[in-house]
């Protein structure tokens, strides 16, 4: 007589005929190799897209960090260069005063007193030394005489007709322009040339018969 064990069959809960256990626990058939390859390829593409997005975000963040760092370094450098701007402007005024004092000395004459000659030499030597010291610290002066009027560096104090100077040029400088590391400290006070009235009006026509 043949007997069945629990490993070979299980009882039907409804009291029916026993059913083999391996029929109730049948696993799904594995995917085909093509399907597995397609799924792997799709997953790889998805991971590559995520990696590219993360790389793009990292590069953007790195570029922004570099911009902030560069901007900070530039601001620190500018602060160092122009921290003494007010002091430099005052020093430029002293140099202008020295120049006016030198200009007040009479011009060289063959019979001038020795005291005047020594005074002039002393003023000139002091001015040269003073200007050299200022230039070492980025403070320079510019003489605009003969140059085209520049509103960024010059302040027009008067306009004067002149046939010797082209219109719009500086024919006389009452004071010079001063700059600190290329930045304007004090504008030059200038007189600007303009065309004579006769040239502006043009030649007159002779209406006589």
Image (cartoon, grey):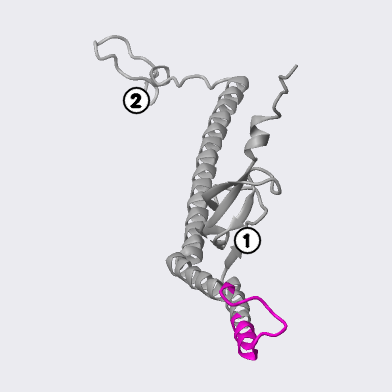
162 to 115, vertically: above or below = above
**Which residue sits at x=61%, y=90%?**
115
Task: Say which residue appears at 66% left-offset and 85% top-offset.
Answer: 112
Determine the residue located farthest toward the bottom in the rendered image: 114
Q: Which residue is mark 2?
A: 6
Q: CA gap, disc 1 to disc 2?
A: 114 Å
Secondary structure type for disc 1? loop
Q: Position of residue 19 (x, y in %)?
A: 36, 14
Residue marked by disc 1: 143
In reply to whether residue 75 is colored magenta, the answer given is no
- Tell me if 196 is positioned left or right of 4 in this view: right
Q: Position of residue 64 (x, y in %)?
A: 49, 46
Q: Quick one: 82 or 51, which is closer to the camera?
A: 82
Left or right? Give the position of 91 relative to 172: left
Vertical side of 176 occupied by 198: above or below? above
> From the image, which quarter does the C terminus lie in?
top right
Give the magenta part as a residue range: 103-123
The numbered mark, 1 or 2, whose residue comes first in the sequence reads: 2
Q: Residue at x 51, y 62 (%)?
A: 77
């Amino acid at each position: 007589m043949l007997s069945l064990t629990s490993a070979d069959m299980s009882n039907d809960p409804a009291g029916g005929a026993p059913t083999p256990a391996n029929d109730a626990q049948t696993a799904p058939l594995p995917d085909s190799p093509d399907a597995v390859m397609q799924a792997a390829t799709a997953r790889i593409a998805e991971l590559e897209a995520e990696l590219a997005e993360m790389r793009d975000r990292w590069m953007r963040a790195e570029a922004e960090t570099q911009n902030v760092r560069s901007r900070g370094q530039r601001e620190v450098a500018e602060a160092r260069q122009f921290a003494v701007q007010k002091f430099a402007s005052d020093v430029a005024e002293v140099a202008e005063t020295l120049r006016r004092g030198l200009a007040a000395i009479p011009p060289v004459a063959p019979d001038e007193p020795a005291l005047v000659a020594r005074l002039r030499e002393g003023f000139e030597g002091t001015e040269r030394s003073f200007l050299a010291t200022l230039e070492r610290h980025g403070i320079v002066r510019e003489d605009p005489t003969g140059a085209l009027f520049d509103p960024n560096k010059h302040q027009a104090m008067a306009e004067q007709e002149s046939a010797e100077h082209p219109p719009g040029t500086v024919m006389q400088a009452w004071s010079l322009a001063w700059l600190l590391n290329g930045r304007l400290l004090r504008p030059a006070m200038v007189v600007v040339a303009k065309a004579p009235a006769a040239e502006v009006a043009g030649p007159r026509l002779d209406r006589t018969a």
